[in-house]
Amino acid sequence: MPDDPPDPLFPAEPALSDADRDALLRWRLVLGPGAEGARAGLGLGRLGARARAAIGVDEGRLGALDRAIGFAYDDDERGADLSGSAPYVPQWLSALREFFSGESVAMMQRDAVDRGLKELLFEPETLPLLEKNVELVATLMAARSLVPERAKAIARQIVAEVVAEIRKKLESQLRTAIFGALRRDRHSPLRLLRNLDWRRTVRSNLHGWDAERRRLVPERFYFWSNQRRHHERDVVVLVDQSGSMATSVVYASIMAAIFASLDVLRTRLVAFDTEIADLTPLLDDPVEVLFAAQLGGGTDIERAVAYAQTELIDRPAKTLLLLVTDLYEGGDAPKLVARLGHLVESGVQVLCLLALGEGGAPAHNEALAADLVGLGIPCFACTPDRLAGVIEEVLSSSKRPSKRVGR
């Protein structure tokens, strides 16, 4: 394949390798059409067919790829608010799926929404084309007042699909972790192999080690109880519904619904900003919980903790308080620390999740987190796949979570 004609701005271009051409084309797509005004050699046609072939897009589709990226990021004739672009939205979403993976589609979709595309994404013709994920659910919840009546049924269906998918992934892990942790609170006289407590049996019989035969000769076996009691433990989930906690609200609501489905736990869910919303009666349906949440607004953590302390906690030694917040307190921080200290002293196990989701290290109030850690309250972010392990550790009576701040 012949090289492109030489460009005086790029005198060495005939010597460029295919990898160099590929890199130039990718940079041109990232920088947008404005890059061509700075260097003429960065025009899509100028970069040549070899580079186009390197990324798997033929010349006829390269312009469509450029427009798909530019729709979310370029400040061109569409304007910063992307107004007047409604007819193009379905085409744009279709192009995203053609050229990018699901993860990239979700990221560009989120960026477009952040730039003012909310109203367009709520059109009934567009909603079914969106990448269905937690971020989309959080966006729908935060801006549901903008959803037109004709699109509300579709929006609800999308939320239900995402919730069902997340619940499917989490439920089995959480059930296993919770039942395993609570069963380890007690031993049973029933001598069944499936209930054998291997760890305690080995540890308690180490004196019976036969060095000559290299085997352990146990004097006593220990077995876990296989019985479950109704409402063995109480779980109170307090969820900060300020805007920065949007995805955490989604995960926490689903987590609380799973807890509520287990007869061994008595579960309460409270969402808060500067007001208190006890969502416990809705726990049978996490979709209803999410539509009842009011994302955005201020934050009064102390008021929420006070409500839990006075109205919800009647068995401190059997209560786990899950506080899901980034700890940016708009209320009385010293009073919050004192109240949480009293709860810990009374026997309540308190755990602060700074974020519950797939994101990186969360922004949080480091000074307040350090104060809580000083009380023996762990403060850290948690991804959904690690949630079951955290809950099992906290509920196990024989061990308490380590003091930590971070992820």
Image (cartoon, helix red, strand yellow):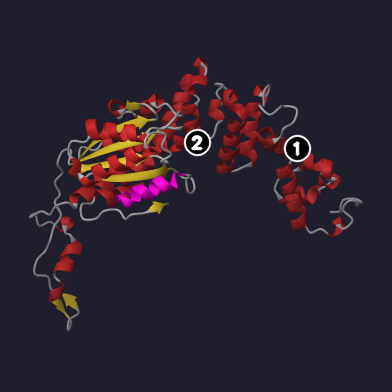
Which portion, as a residue range, is magenta? 364-383
Question: Residue at label 1?
Answer: 63
Which amino acid type is shown beneath numbered disc 2? Glu
Q: Which labelled disc corresponds to residue 135?
A: 2
User: Is residue 380 shown left or right of residue 26?
Assistant: left
Q: Which residue occupies the extreme bottom position in the image?
A: 212
Q: Quadrant of the N terminus?
A: bottom right
| Residue 365 within the magenta-colored segment of the rendering | yes
Element type where label 2 sits in the image: helix
- Give the side of residue 168 with respect to residue 92, left or right: left
Q: Tell me which label, 1 or 2, sits earlier in the chain.
A: 1
Q: Is residue 352 above or below residue 299?
A: below
User: What residue do we see at 32% from left, 42% from top?
Assistant: 337
Residues at discs 1 and 2 in contact (Cβ within 8 Å): no
Assign a secondary structure to mark 1: helix
Task: Inspect the magenta stretch and tell me whether residue 96 lies in it.
Answer: no
Q: Nearer the viewer, residue 250 or 102?
A: 250
> Considering depth in this image, is 404 or 186 the residue closer to the camera?
404
The residue shown at (39%, 45%) is 368
Q: Taking 131 as reference, is 207 above or below it?
A: below
Q: Position of residue 32 (x, y in %)?
A: 74, 40
